[in-house]
Amino acid sequence: MTTGTLLAVCRVHALLPTKDSTGVTAIDKRPVEGPVNVHPLGLTGDVQASRKHHGGPVKALYAYAQDDADFWARDLGRDIPPGLFGENLRVAGIDASNAVIGERWAIGAQVVLEATMPRTPCVNFARYLGERSWVRRFAEANRVGTYLSVVSKGAITAGDAVRLVSVPEHGVTAAQVYAGLDGQQAQRLLDAAAAGHLALTPQVRKAALQGLRVPAPA
């Protein structure tokens, strides 16, 4: 199985004001040194300002790959340091955007994480980054990273190995979910869930049903 590296562990540095109803955003994530505990809702010391759109058990952690960050560094002509995109984990050697839904990563001695769904860019992300038409550009590139749930808790540290320990046979990735599934992809994903091989988030199930041209439940 593939082995990569955890380059940085990032958590909120400061809550920043926003113009939305929440009033603040926790997108300002920055690397921290030393071991950080991982629990079912994410990293100890981290926070999400809007639990409607961020956080919770199926979006406990957000991972972004260094290859994708390097793409944006070239495209934007600026550094993309760990945490700038609001990610908790910056990884190398692991393709976060093309993580198969349900694949599992082992980090360090104890932590196991499961890829659950792609990240959807929001207006607070765009305002924080300060790039024109950022939501559209980020979406079109489809280098969106992946959210992860926590299967086994423990401590992680920058420099830990990230081991890809299992990959579901359905093969549908976070990037494919974000781009929109075709009928075959949707059916494979729904069949895998029906067989008990993985649990789909409501967002991914909705995307699969849309792929089948079946109205999603209200």
Image (cartoon, rainbow, N blue to C red):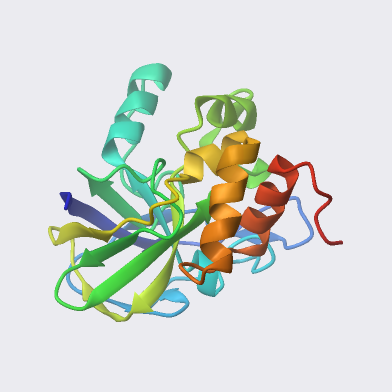
Image height of 156 relative to 163, above or below: below
Q: Is residue 54 left or right of residue 174?
A: right
Q: In this view, does 146 lie to the left or right of 81?
A: right
Image height of 126 relative to 204, above or below: above
Q: In this view, does 189 lie to the left or right of 197?
A: right
Q: Position of residue 170 (x, y in %)?
A: 45, 50
The residue shown at (31%, 42%) is: 95
Q: Nearer the viewer, residue 20 or 59?
A: 59
Q: Is residue 163 left or right of residue 112?
A: left
The residue shown at (52%, 36%) is: 129
Residue 13 visible to an observer of this rendering: no
Can you tell which quarter of the image residue 23 is in? bottom right
Q: Position of residue 38 (x, y in %)?
A: 33, 77
Can you tell which quarter of the image residue 184 is in? top right
Figure label count: 0
Image height of 190 relative to 96, above or below: below
Q: Where is residue 33 in the image (x, y as percent from the top left)?
A: 20, 65
Q: Nearer the viewer, residue 197 or 19?
A: 197
Q: Position of residue 143 (x, y in %)?
A: 45, 34
Can you tell which quarter of the image residue 74 is in? top left
Q: Nearer the viewer, residue 165 or 95?
A: 165
The residue shown at (18%, 67%) is: 157
The residue shown at (23%, 66%) is: 106
Image height of 169 relative to 80, above or below: below
